[in-house]
């Protein structure tokens, strides 16, 4: 089951997804709210944290999560974060009850990952793409619009035919037209460039 622990937070943060099951996993930690208390509210024993990318709104609560739980923190192998384990492009890991493949998808951030489970049709897309075809900023350090477009095309190709929903770093999930939202983001990113 996927729970957005930041859904009602009125502070600068990212979405923070608690995925329960055999491998209880937090996808991003968010910032500026008590994520530890919200994990406890779900009665979950946290096993792992996966970081989609190292922007402050996605990792601000990482120290508190490390202090509260004995967890492995994983993210892209080339990240500047102190990780317990780096994930290589196309490496698989268990999140909840399912296997996900990590895809290196730079453009918004150099260390950006998307996590896709073909079995469930779910993809955690960080700030690569948003519902209704928005896409991550490319005016930040380490960002690049052409690289982002390439990453959008890649995630569209690897999820083609299996994508049921994606969970983005900001805003609502895309659960009705996820593939179309990615295609729309590609077109918009190419037009704005």
Image: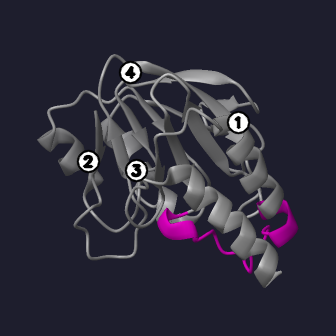
Numbered disc in front, either 3 or 4: 3
**Pointer 3: what residue?**
175
**Residue at image point 56% right, 32% down:** 162
Report helix, strand or loop for mark 3: loop
Residue where numbered disc 2 is placed: 36
Within 10 angstroms of label 3, few (less than 14), some, or many (20 or more) residues? some
- According to the image, label 4 marks what residue? 23
Q: Earlier in the sequence, mark 3 or mark 4?
A: 4
Answer left or right for 30 relative to 89: left
Within 10 Å of disc 1 (Cα), the crowding (few <14, some 14-19, many 20+) is: some
Look at mark 1 in the image and give the residue it sits on. Answer: 158
Residues drawn in magenta: 130-148
Residue 77 placement: quadrant: top right
Residue 96 image point, x, y percent: 38, 25
Task: Give the CA separation, mark 3 to mark 4.
Answer: 23 Å
Compared with 39, 110 (above or below) is: below
Residue 27 lies in quadrant: top left
Of labels 1 and 2, earlier in sequence is 2
The answer to which of marks 2 and 3 sits earlier in the sequence is 2
């Amino acid at each position: 089951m996927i729970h957005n622990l930041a859904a009602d937070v009125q502070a600068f943060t990212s979405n923070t997804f608690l995925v329960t099951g055999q491998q209880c996993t937090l996808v991003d930690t968010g910032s500026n709210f008590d994520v530890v208390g919200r994990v406890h509210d779900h009665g979950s024993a946290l096993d792992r944290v996966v970081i989609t990318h190292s922007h402050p709104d996605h990792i601000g609560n990482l120290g508190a999560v490390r202090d509260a739980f004995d967890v492995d923190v994983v993210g892209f192998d080339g990240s500047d974060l102190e990780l317990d384990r780096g994930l290589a492009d196309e490496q698989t890991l268990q999140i909840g009850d399912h296997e996900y493949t990590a895809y290196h998808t730079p453009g918004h951030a150099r260390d950006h990952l998307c996590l896709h489970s073909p079995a469930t049709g779910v993809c955690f897309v960080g700030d690569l793409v948003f519902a209704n075809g928005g896409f991550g900023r490319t005016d930040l350090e380490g960002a690049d619009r052409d690289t982002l477009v390439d990453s959008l095309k890649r995630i569209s190709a690897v999820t083609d035919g299996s994508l049921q929903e994606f969970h983005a770093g900001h805003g609502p999930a895309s659960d009705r037209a996820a593939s179309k939202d990615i295609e729309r983001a590609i077109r918009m990113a190419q037009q704005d460039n």
